[in-house]
Image (spheres, rainbow, N blue to C red):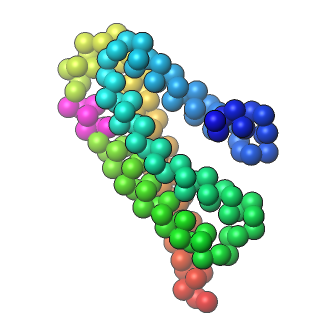
């Protein structure tokens, strides 16, 4: 739904979100088409638990509520869910990739390259965004502490 909304109303967000969703959908398509490694799709779907907090942050920002207590609470919840559902799952995906390498090597070369690239992509992006979210949260909390 996010991608459709952004394509219809570009002011809602950057088009890189659409590219992100294309990669996710292609991964789900490959998992279901080849009927292998489906557990990776399920595990990655758990990362979407952060979505409500990401979306609510956007709404608070557009409504001019960046100084509100709710904005801070949402930011803390975003940080917590990002850590629990994205950072821990990212680390678990790297472990699974190592642990199940034998199973992965039994698939086609396309799947091997695709899954390794996707996992590296997920881990890299989640880490970059976690650092940005952490810096933002620390900045807001420091400002609150001074007041």
Quarter of the picture holding the C terminus? bottom right
Instruction: Identify the residue at horizontal 59%, vertical 72% (top origin).
Output: 70
Residue 46 on image: x %, y %: 40, 42
Eyeballing the image, is 85 above or below 97?
below
> Which quarter of the figure has residue 41?
top left
The answer to whether residue 35 shows anywhere in this view is yes
Q: Quick one: 1 or 113, which is closer to the camera?
A: 1
- Residue sitting at x 61%, y 69%: 71
| Extent of the magenta region | 93-99
Query: Which residue: 26% across, 16% down?
Result: 105
Q: Nearer the viewer, residue 5 or 24?
A: 5
On the picture, is 41 further left or further right than 132? left
Q: Is residue 16 above or below residue 113?
A: below
Q: Position of residue 34 (x, y in %)?
A: 37, 12
- Magenta stretch: residue 26 in it? no
Location of residue 24 in the rendering, given as x and y in whole percent from the top left corner: 51, 30
Q: Main secondary structure of the magenta part?
A: helix
Q: Nearer the viewer, residue 131 or 66?
A: 66
Left of 7 or right of it: where is 97? left
Q: Is residue 135 visible?
A: no
Query: Which of 70/111 is in front?
Result: 70
Residue 49 vertical placement versus 103 (above, below): below
Q: Is residue 33 left or right of residue 95?
A: right
**Which residue is at a point 47% across and 44% down the rendered structure image?**
48
Residue 47 % position (x, y): 43, 44
Quadrant of the image containing the N terminus? top right
């Amino acid at each position: 739904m996010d991608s459709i909304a952004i394509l219809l109303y570009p002011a809602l967000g950057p088009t890189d979100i659409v590219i992100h969703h294309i990669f996710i959908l292609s991964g789900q398509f490959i998992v279901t088409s080849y009927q292998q490694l489906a557990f990776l799709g399920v595990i990655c779907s758990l990362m979407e638990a952060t979505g409500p907090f990401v979306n609510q942050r956007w709404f608070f920002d557009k409504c001019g509520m960046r100084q509100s207590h709710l904005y801070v609470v949402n930011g803390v919840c975003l940080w917590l869910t990002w850590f629990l559902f994205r950072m821990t799952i990212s680390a678990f995906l790297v472990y699974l990739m190592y642990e199940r390498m034998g199973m992965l090597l039994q698939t086609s070369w396309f799947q091997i390259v695709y899954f390794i690239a996707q996992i590296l992509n997920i881990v890299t992006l989640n880490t970059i965004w976690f650092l940005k979210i952490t810096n933002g949260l620390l900045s807001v909390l420091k400002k609150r502490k001074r007041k």
